[in-house]
């Protein structure tokens, strides 16, 4: 709008309203005389103004004054300020605040009112605190009794709430509220299944804790049986092996023979504490309890064989069983073994039991995975001070654990009655407590890279006398093809089932096989582990640490087809076992 | 000064009513004291009753002005009530440089313009409840009311003429409802409320020239809206 036009319009407006001065009015009238159409325009505008002025006036509704005066009176009475008059936003604010408060209060009430189960972290704390309190019988109350209740409690578990929110985001809120996992996506369904297994795992963990207690008691009652099993190997425990429950509950029994048992025990407990593994120390087997066990099994009817003879038997037995450490004596040794199969072996067994029981120091029971067991065994075996050896007695011990408390362990009976198949180490222990026999046995063990290891490795192949004969006739029965196939397919050999590889390496290399060997439970699945620590009766105090003999390794003694079937873990173990300890 | 200005001054308390002048002719102080200003000063001092009297004094005029602007009675009632409430909460903002009604009308017209801009709707004015002239209806002492009453009195209230007047008022209100909010405001303030140019400029915050130009354009727009009615009358 131009300035001139605005001035003209303002003058015309003032002219219509009669508020223009005389000079301006004269100027406009002069213009209107020359332009009659402008005059008509101004007259129409004046008529329009009059129409507005003639509009009727409407009175205000009475409620305006009444409402305002009422508010004024209330403000006077209540001493309110003027801003409280009229419609206010505060009622809405108060209403919204009340809704929020009620909702939050209801949420808090529901949160605290609903029963809550222990979260995994709380359960872990509780479980970790149990050994210190010594009250192992206290069982957490909310542990599930049935699967359904476990799932319900898992839904309320604090640790699972975040996962449940994640599931809700995947599956939609309404379905999750109704608890209909059928509409979940596959990933969410899998997560839900994992979540549902959580309390089961907790329950299983508690059950394992109970089993641990029971196992500790049983081991404490029958420590000699374990040691006897260590001495006798697994050859005569075929029934026990067959009856063994190949489940994760099968205890893994490790016999640790150490030059310094106390240091080794400290190593064991340090490792267990470091790994935060729950462990128990089995009640110390008193001589009154330990000694009668073998005596009650089978009385010693014959005197112990001479040490030399026993040593010779050991040597021949090792050869007959395909000892990897002495393959050069296989043929001759097998012939001797055939002769030995015909001799009663109860004597050797009883002597071995009696001697080994005396060396049993402490028994530890714990739950750990096979991987951890292998790591522990490796730690112990690779330590230079003290020198310790680790053996796996799992299958033999299983029958002991399965025996009823108080009765004579079946394996012990079996050991006592059936004799020892190739108990080189056992015979060595039993007969070689002193003198040349012991030195010979020790030297044999050293030369073989660990007599116990050899014995455990080849024991399945010589479970019976017939097997021993067959093994003796074999040219290099380190691990026969049939045995390997049998152990790998139909009936796992005890050593293999226990995770031991049939290799002639030292005991230090065996723990690696504990985790790598064929197991019925995953490597990370916790299993009951019994650790027997005893003094090594044949501690090579002055014996030189002879390297492993340059004998052909197991892989070399096996046919090419067998080599190809050998697992990489076994191959690596064989390579490790060739290294001098 | 025209009669319109005198009536306006009476309505805003600038000029005491004729009855008051005659009742207290010699009291210069009473003549100089504007009743609405005195009431507002009392209200500023915390006298809620004084503000209640201001409400009673201006509610009809303010309501009518707001009604002509927004075209809806209920909305006009709410806006009028809100204007009085805000006036009470902003009593300290009144400094006396304008009349109390101008101060209140500024609040009300701002509320009405904001409401019209917010709603952006064209209202259809009607005269469903016309004021019964001279028959017990409330009378305002404003110049517009006097003018309307005067016109009504001058005319004979025959039924045909009454119907014609109703038709005319409806047409004017409908045309007014079709104008922009700014044009409505200046037309209501000038032709219905009788504000002078300076008061209008103060309320709207416009220069005088701009205000007059806007008023001229608003009248042109209203005339265009009433062209059909005016041509029919001719």
Image (cartoon, helix red, strand yellow):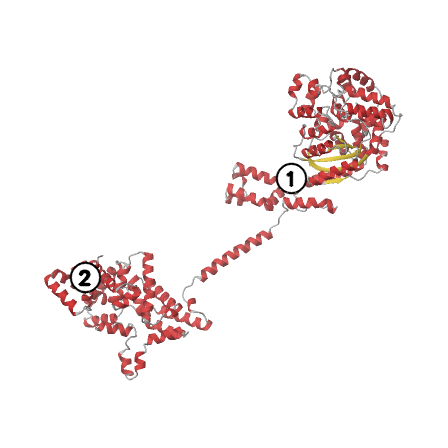
Q: Chain of mark 2?
A: A
Q: Is residue A335 left or right of residue A111?
A: right
Picture disc at residue B234? none
Residue on which the image places disc 1? A201
Secondary structure under tag 2 reads helix
Which of B125 and A164 lies nearest the eye of the viewer?
A164
Q: Is residue A56 visible?
A: no
Residue A283 position, x and y percent, is: 79, 40
Q: Is residue B44 above or below residue A312?
A: below
C-alpha span from label 2 to label 1? 96 Å
* Left or right side of B73 for B153: left
Circles 2 and 1 in contact, beta carbons < 8 Å: no
In which quadrant of the rendered image does the N terminus of chain A lie? bottom left
Quadrant location of residue A388?
top right
* Whether marks 2 and 1 lie on the same chain: yes
Position of residue A575 relative to residue A20, above or below, is above
Picture coordinates of residue A47, whole percent (x, y): 18, 64
Residue that appears at 12% across and 60% down: A37
Q: Tell me the residue that label 2 is attached to.
A: A8
Locate residue A354, reporting x and y percent.
85, 31
Q: Quadrant of residue B74?
A: bottom left
């Amino acid at each position: 709008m131009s300035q001139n036009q605005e001035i003209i319009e303002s003058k015309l407006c003032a002219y219509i309203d009669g508020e223009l001065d005389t000079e301006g009015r004269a100027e406009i009238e002069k213009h209107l005389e020359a332009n009659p159409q402008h005059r008509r325009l101004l007259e129409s505008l004046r008529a329009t103004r009059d129409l507005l002025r003639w509009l009727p006036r409407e009175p205000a509704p009475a409620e305006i004054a009444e409402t305002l005066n009422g508010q004024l009176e209330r403000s006077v009475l209540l001493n309110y300020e003027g801003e409280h008059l009229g419609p206010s936003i505060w009622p809405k604010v108060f209403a919204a605040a009340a809704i929020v408060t009620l909702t939050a209060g209801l949420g808090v009430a529901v949160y605290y009112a609903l029963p809550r189960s222990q979260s995994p972290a709380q359960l872990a704390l509780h479980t970790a605190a149990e050994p210190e309190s010594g009250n192992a019988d206290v069982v957490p109350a909310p542990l599930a009794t049935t699967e359904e209740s476990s799932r319900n409690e898992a839904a309320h578990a604090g640790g699972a709430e975040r996962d449940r929110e994640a599931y809700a985001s995947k599956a939609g809120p309404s379905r999750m509220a109704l608890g209909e996992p059928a509409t979940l996506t596959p990933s969410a369904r899998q997560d839900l299944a994992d979540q549902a297994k959580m309390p089961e795992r907790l329950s299983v963990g508690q059950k394992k804790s109970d089993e641990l207690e029971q196992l500790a008691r049983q081991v404490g009652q029958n420590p000699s049986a374990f040691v006897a099993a260590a001495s006798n190997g697994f050859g005569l425990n075929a029934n026990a092996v067959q009856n063994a429950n190949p489940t994760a509950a099968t205890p893994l029994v490790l016999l640790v023979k150490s030059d310094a048992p106390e240091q080794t025990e400290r190593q064991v407990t340090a490792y267990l504490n470091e790994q935060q593994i729950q462990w128990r120390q089995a009640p110390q087997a008193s001589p009154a309890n330990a000694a009668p066990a073998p005596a009650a099994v089978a009385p010693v009817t014959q005197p112990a064989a001479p040490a030399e003879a026993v040593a010779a038997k050991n040597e021949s037995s090792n050869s007959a069983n395909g000892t990897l450490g002495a393959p050069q004596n296989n043929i001759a040794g097998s012939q001797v073994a055939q002769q030995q199969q015909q001799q009663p072996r109860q004597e050797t067994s009883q002597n071995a039991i009696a001697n080994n029981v005396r060396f049993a120091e402490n028994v530890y029971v714990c739950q750990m995975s096979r991987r951890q067991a292998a790591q522990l065994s490796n730690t112990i075996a690779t330590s230079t001070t003290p020198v310790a050896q680790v053996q796996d007695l799992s299958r033999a011990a299983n029958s002991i654990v399965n025996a009823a408390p108080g009765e004579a362990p079946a394996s012990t009976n079996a050991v006592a009655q059936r004799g020892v198949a190739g108990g080189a180490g056992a015979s060595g222990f039993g007969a070689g407590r002193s003198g040349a026999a012991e030195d010979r046995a020790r030297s044999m063990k050293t030369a073989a890279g660990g007599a116990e290891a050899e014995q455990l490795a080849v024991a399945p192949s010589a479970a019976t006398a017939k097997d021993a004969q067959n093994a003796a006739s074999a040219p290099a029965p380190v691990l026969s093809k049939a045995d390997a196939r049998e152990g790998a397919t139909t009936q796992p050999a005890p050593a293999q089932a226990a995770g031991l590889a049939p290799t002639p390496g030292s005991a230090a290399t065996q723990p690696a096989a504990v985790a790598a060997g064929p197991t019925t439970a995953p490597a990370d699945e916790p299993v009951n582990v019994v650790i027997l620590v005893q003094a090594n009766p044949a501690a090579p105090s002055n014996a030189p640490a002879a390297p492993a003999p340059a004998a052909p390794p197991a892989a070399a003694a096996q046919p090419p087809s067998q080599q190809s079937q050998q697992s990489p873990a076994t191959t690596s173990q064989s390579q490790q076992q060739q290294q001098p300890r | 000064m025209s009669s319109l200005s005198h009536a306006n001054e009476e309505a805003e308390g600038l000029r005491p009513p004729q009855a008051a002048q005659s009742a207290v002719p010699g009291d210069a102080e009473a003549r100089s004291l504007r009743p609405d200003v005195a009431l507002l000063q009392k209200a500023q001092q915390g006298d809620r009753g004084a503000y209640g009297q201001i409400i009673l004094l201006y509610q009809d005029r303010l309501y009518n002005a707001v009604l002509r602007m927004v075209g809806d009675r209920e909305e006009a009632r709410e806006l009028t009530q809100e204007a009085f409430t805000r006036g009470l909460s902003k009593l300290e903002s009144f400094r006396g440089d304008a009349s109390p009604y101008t101060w209140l009308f500024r609040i009300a017209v701002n509320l009405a313009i904001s409401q019209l801009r917010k709603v952006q709707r064209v209202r259809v004015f009607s005269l469903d409840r016309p004021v019964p002239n001279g028959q017990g209806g409330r009378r305002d002492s404003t110049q517009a009311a006097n003018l309307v009453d005067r016109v009504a009195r001058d005319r004979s209230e025959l039924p045909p003429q009454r119907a014609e007047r109703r038709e005319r008022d409806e047409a004017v209100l409908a045309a007014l409802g079709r104008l922009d909010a700014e044009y409505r405001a200046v037309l209501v303030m000038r032709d219905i409320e009788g504000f002078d140019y300076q008061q209008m400029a103060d309320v709207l915050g416009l220069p005088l020239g701009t205000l007059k130009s806007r008023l001229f354009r608003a009248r042109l727009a209203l005339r265009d809206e009433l062209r059909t009615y005016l041509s029919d009358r001719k």
